[in-house]
Image (tube, rainbow, N blue to C red):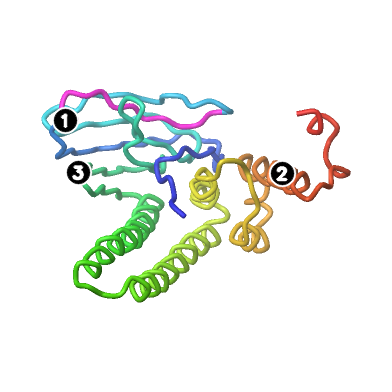
Amino acid sequence: MRLLIAAMLAPIVLCGCAEQFNIEGTSSVPSLDGSKLYLQAVKGEQMVSIDSCEVVHGEFRFAGLLDTVRMASITVGDSHLMPLVLEEGKITVGISQPTMKLGGTPMNDLLYDFMTKHTQIENSMNELGHRENQMLLDGIDEQTIARQVQLEAAVLTRQEDSLVTNFICDNFDNVLGPGIFMMLTSGYRYPILTPQIEQIMSKATESFKQDAYVREYMRMARENEARLMGDDSGLPTDSLSQ
């Protein structure tokens, strides 16, 4: 399971007053110098650009008024560079290869800590492939290699599932919970119910359940499950004709 960290997330209104966000970024990627970056977020059902700027001598900046705390993404062309939380305060972003840095405000600090831990697990998973090749070169029996790699991969998968599940549960009532839930489910071809999702929803608060993305995902996932089970009795009439 791989999270699409650059996936976009639905906004959640936390207050009715206008606040100021300020993003100050640096880039050590030569190909980005002179490029136009966009700050994008979801409004309604569409992706919209909130601000744009150019990378000049490795520096860039976004700023604006904020009447809701929301998840957003910095993009270049069709590529998402990194997610972040638009909230009041000075947000710092560092773009380099192969790492990204994010911080400066409470929820961005939490998001960056999560992203760092997740990247470490992914790197460990990728390293398994290199180790497998090295063991083959060392003449180790293929079945022995396969057993060892499968065991280590299973441990890493459990670690990843635990990290994601716990982070979502710890952040049910702010933008990070629904946001990471969207990242988790965006990798599926269509909405499905997995043991991990069922575990998350069994603990979910009403606020999390009523998030627009979570509510729609669960509705579609339950409809798909009913179809797979051959039970259309509980589906809306219009969905049966689709």
- Residue 42 at x, y = what percent? 50, 31
Tell me: residue 202, above or below residue 14.
below
User: Separation of disc 3 and disc 2 at Cα?
Assistant: 41 Å
Looking at this view, is 90 or 54 the one in front? 54
Mark 1 lies on a secondary structure that is helix
Q: Earlier in the sequence, mark 2 or mark 1?
A: 1
Number of numbered labels in the structure image: 3
- Residue 179 at x, y = what percent? 50, 46
- Tell me the tag on residue 15: none
> Does residue 40 show up magenta in the picture?
yes
Amino acid bearing label 2: Asn
Residue in the image at 29% along x and 48% along y: 102
Q: Earlier in the sequence, mark 3 or mark 1?
A: 1
Looking at this view, is 12 or 213 the one in front? 213
- Tell me the tag on residue 224: 2
User: Separation of disc 3 and disc 1 at Cα?
Assistant: 11 Å
Q: Are marks 3 and 1 in contact (CB under 8 Å)?
A: no
Q: Quadrant of residue 236?
A: top right
Q: Earlier in the sequence, mark 3 or mark 2?
A: 3
- Residue 125 at x, y = what percent? 34, 61
Residue in the image at 19% along x and 30% along y: 32
Magenta span of residues: 31-43
Nearer mark to the viewer, of 2 and 1: 2
Looking at this view, is 90 or 119 the one in front? 119
- Tell me the tag on residue 31: 1
Quadrant where the C terminus is found in the figure: top right
Q: Which residue is mark 3?
A: 96
Residue in the image at 17% along x and 33% along y: 59
What predominant SS class does the magenta segment belong to? Answer: strand
